[in-house]
Image (cartoon, grey):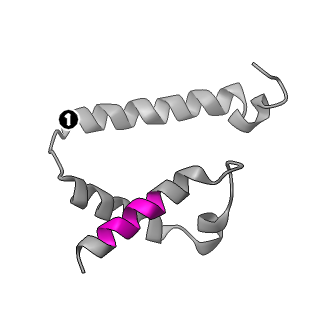
Amino acid sequence: MNTKDSSRFGSAARLRKRAEALAAYEAWDRAHPEPMDPAAAVATVASLYRLLPEEARRRKDDPDFEGVGRMLDALALLGRSHG
């Protein structure tokens, strides 16, 4: 691993805390196995995205801003499909 890039992952303590949070979510998710159709899932993500402050929506954490761009593309398709 390139040590120059390792700082973007944070400290070991932060990684452990994140892993604990993900494990807690996974346990919750297993306890609530309600399937969701894709359109409802994307709409839910969109509603969560709208809760982010504008500054957070514009922040470019990854150099190519690919993750949010893909999500916005998916949301745009959903919007067109519902008129």
**Principal SS element in the magenta part?**
helix
Q: Is residue 23 visible?
A: yes
Question: Is 26 located above or below residue 70 in the figure?
Answer: above
Question: Is 33 located above or below residue 40 in the figure?
Answer: above
Locate residue 71, reporting x and y percent: 45, 57
Residue furthest toward the left?
A: 34
Q: Which of the image's four quarters has the C terminus?
A: bottom left
Image quadrant assignment for residue 53: bottom right
Locate residue 5, reporting x and y percent: 78, 31
Residue furthest toward the top?
A: 1
Residue furthest toward the right?
A: 4
- Residue shown at the point (75%, 18%) measured from the top left: 1
- Residue shown at the point (45%, 71%) measured from the top left: 50
Q: Is residue 83 left or right of residue 49?
A: left
Q: Is residue 72 left or right of residue 56?
A: left
Q: 72 or 10, which lies in front?
A: 72
Q: Is residue 47 visible?
A: no
Judge the density around disc 1: few (<14), some (14-19), many (≥20) Cα neighbours within 10 Å. few
Question: Is 77 located above or below residue 5 in the figure?
Answer: below
Residue furthest toward the bottom?
A: 83
Q: Is residue 62 left or right of residue 34?
A: right
Question: Is 75 located above or below residue 21 in the figure?
Answer: below
Locate residue 17, reporting x and y percent: 57, 32
**Which residue is tagged 1?**
31
- Residue shown at the point (23%, 53%) measured from the top left: 38
- Residue shown at the point (55%, 35%) measured from the top left: 18
**Magenta region:** 71-79
Q: Secondary structure beneath disc 1? A: helix
Locate residue 72, reporting x and y percent: 47, 63
Which kind of residue does numbered mark 1 sit on?
Answer: Ala
